[in-house]
Every structure is written in structure tokens, then in C-alpha cells.
Amino acid sequence: MIQTTTETVFSFLIQTEDNRIDTTVASTQIRHLFKFTNDLDKSVQYVYPVAQEINDRYTVGVFAYHVTPNVYDGTVNLLPAGYWKYEVYEVSWIGTVVLSSGKAPATENDALLPAADTKGVVQGLVTKGKMYVADKDKTEQVQYTQRQEPSGTNYIYYGQ
């Protein structure tokens, strides 16, 4: 499970290479498209990580916070806090990898036509899981103020 806090930069380590679909290209030609779905309001956000490093057993990636999320620059706005589902789709290129509109698919169903080596192709789902997003300190929807304990007894008498 990925755990993070709202309005922060966060990184993840997930297993993607065990389920890799396109083994005909080098790992430098692969990017991962994330689909985040909020459990509470069912809102969906798609995003490619700001930075991604594929290792033999796992992939490391980084996301950044921004009020207006952008699929291609790695920014997300994971509000409201709570549980989110994530799905990770493998996208591969034959030519140069470019994360921009018209060059990289924006969703798992996006087919860029006409096909070209410079356009990414969604190969399929490689992993999925749950993510917990906690509220940033001092931004919780419910906040409690701690009061000093009374010096005397604090009894409530009933029926006297």
C-alpha cells in the first residue's frame, strides 16, 4: 500500500517488471500511466510520474502536488483525503519518449492515431493496489483542541 499526505511531493516503489508486457523495448522506452480513483467520491485522475526509474525488481517514481493536476507533468491533487485505488498501465514507445498531448496516451483507452514510433501505446495493466492519503497537518476536516486538565474533580452528579 502506498501511503502519502495531501499537498506534498511523494514517491513510490512498486513492482512492475514481473508483469511487464512489452519486452521488445528497453526499460528506457517504458513509462507508467497511473489511474487514481477516490473511494469516497469516485473522482479519477490520470498521471505519469514526474520522475521514474525502472530497476530489475521494482520501479521508483515521484509525483508532485498542484491545485490543477496535469497528466503529463506528474502533478496530482489527491483531495479529498482518504483511500484511493491505483491502477498502473504500461506505455511503450519505439522511438523517443515524449510525455505531451498527442505523443503520450492520456488514459488507458487512448489510442493515438495515426500510429507512429514517436507515439506511446498502452500495453495493458501491470499492477494495481490501494493508497492511503492522509490530511496535511493543520488541514484536517475535523480538528481537536487539547485543553488543560482541570485541577479539581470533574464529576457530573445525576438525580440528587
Image: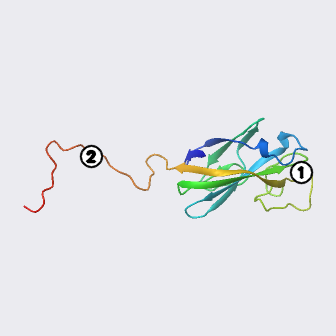
Q: Residues within 10 Å of mark 2 (few under 14, many from 20)?
A: few
Q: Is residue 91 left or right of residue 8?
A: right
- The answer to whether residue 117 is above or below residue 39 is above
82 and 16: which is toward the camera: 16
Would you name the residue on which mark 2 appears?
147
| Residue type at numbered disc 1 | Thr
Q: Which mark is residue 118?
A: 1
Residue depicted at x 56% and y 64%: 41
Residue depicted at x 49% and y 47%: 136
Residue depicted at x 65% and y 45%: 63
**Image quarter (top left, top right, bottom left or bottom right) of the C terminus:** bottom left
- Chosen colour scheme: rainbow
Check disc 1 and report its element: helix, strand or loop: loop
32 and 154: which is toward the camera: 154
Q: How far from the left and from the top, in percent, is residue 69?
A: 65, 55
| Quarter of the rendering containing residue 11 | top right
Residue depicted at x 81% and y 51%: 91
Q: How far from the left and from the top, in percent, is residue 129?
A: 65, 51
Q: How far from the left and from the top, in percent, is residue 110?
A: 80, 61
**Nearer the N terminus, badge 1 or badge 2?**
1
| Residue type at numbered disc 2 | Arg
Q: Residues within 10 Å of mark 1 (few under 14, many from 20)?
A: some
Q: Is residue 155 left or right of residue 17?
A: left
